[in-house]
Amino acid sequence: MYQLKGKIDSTNAHEFENAILAAKPSEIDASDLEYISSAGLRVLMKLKKAVSDVTVLNVSPEVYEILDITGFTSILNVQKAIREIDLTGKEIIAQGGNGTVYRLDDETIVKLYKPDYPMEKIERERRYAKAAFVSGIPSVIAYDTVRSGDSYGVMYEAINSDTLSHAMVSDPEHLDEYIGKYVAFVRKIHSTPIIGDEITPLKSFLRSRVSSADMLLFCEQSEVDVLLGIIDAMADGDTLAHGDLHPGNIMLQNGELMLIDMGEATRGTAIYDVANIYRDLISGPKTQPDVIRVSVGMEPEMALAVGRKFLMQYSGSQDEEQFERYLGMLGLVYAFAVVCFIPDIPMNREQFGAGIVQNLLRPVVLPNADTLKGILSR
């Protein structure tokens, strides 16, 4: 990898040009670069013309600002140096299956992922968070990717914030008020179009999962074809399908709700997103109570009560019978979602994959394929 060091300005730009154009590197390490002037930037422009795909790694905040102001971050693939932080003794404000959220100081929080979590997904979450913010989604501002020990994460602005889950648990007298805010918040998310193409469409995301070779380890090709037919019938929604919209992933900041954790986000139909709320607040408290205690941040009984009140208000159900039908519809969509994620099972894939096929795909999803098409096409 080509190394840049010290300062590059008019006094050494000619020497820099001769050396870098002779090497024609596609990757440049800027960890020791202190400053670059317009003369140095003109050399990088010449390199870009000679080498179409140029990546500049480990850029300091000061140099990154120069590259950003001059537009070079849109010309070259520029990646900031990852900031090291110490989270020893810091307050844990939320935990989930993939990581832990810490309060770093009065103005920032950090979502730190498990050591084996892919960097590609961490960077995707940071980009998606920015795309959601620009689109008008009430969300916490994402700053940089950071590292603590063997783990990486994303730093967010979070002034005077708490999780909605913790607020509900610590202030039960105002639970109904919090649920009302929760309903209004989710409705806003599901009615705000996402600007640009940064966030992957839900249909494309699901199709890539279902079409993977791993699905055929458990399913027949004819069964995969039925799943693909359901995906094809889905509405092409342009709003955020967050995928993990439970109260533990929502910050209460100065009385307003703000979204965090964009790792599972896509653009697509709202009903798919609501089915994942059903997973965390209706199905999960009954089937995986210990997981819900950690991920949602409340006792299963309370999570179930919050889930039922939330979904009744969100759906506008007029009576218990209508509401139970609505829950049945969400349960069916949730079953379909679980089947689609067979390739993403992190451990004991053979055991869990076979169980999903036998307990969900064949007795639930396949016989109701036409019903699912009708639900997801709305």
Image: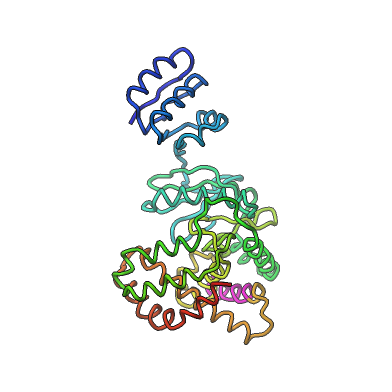
| Horizontal and vertical percent position of residue 352 | 34, 72
| Horizontal and vertical percent position of residue 208 | 40, 61
Task: Name the magenta segment's main secondary structure.
Answer: helix
Which residue is pictured at 48% across the width and 17% down the height? 9
| Horizontal and vertical percent position of residue 127 | 51, 48
Residue 105 against residue 185 in the figure, above or below: above
| Horizontal and vertical percent position of residue 327 | 56, 79
In the image, taking residue 327 as reference, residue 27 lies left or right, namely: left
Q: Residue 308 lies in magenta, yes or no? A: yes
Frontmost residue, 48 versus 146: 48
Quadrant assignment for the C terminus: bottom right
Disc tally is 0
In the image, taking residue 86 as reference, residue 254 lies left or right, namely: right
Which residue is pictured at 45% across the width and 39% down the height? 82
- Judging from the image, the colouring scheme is rainbow
Frontmost residue, 55 versus 274: 55
Q: Residue 52 lies in magenta, yes or no? A: no
Where does the magenta region start and end? 299-311
Frontmost residue, 80 versus 68: 68
Quadrant assignment for the N terminus: top left
Residue furthest top in the image? 11
Residue 154 against residue 37 in the figure, above or below: below
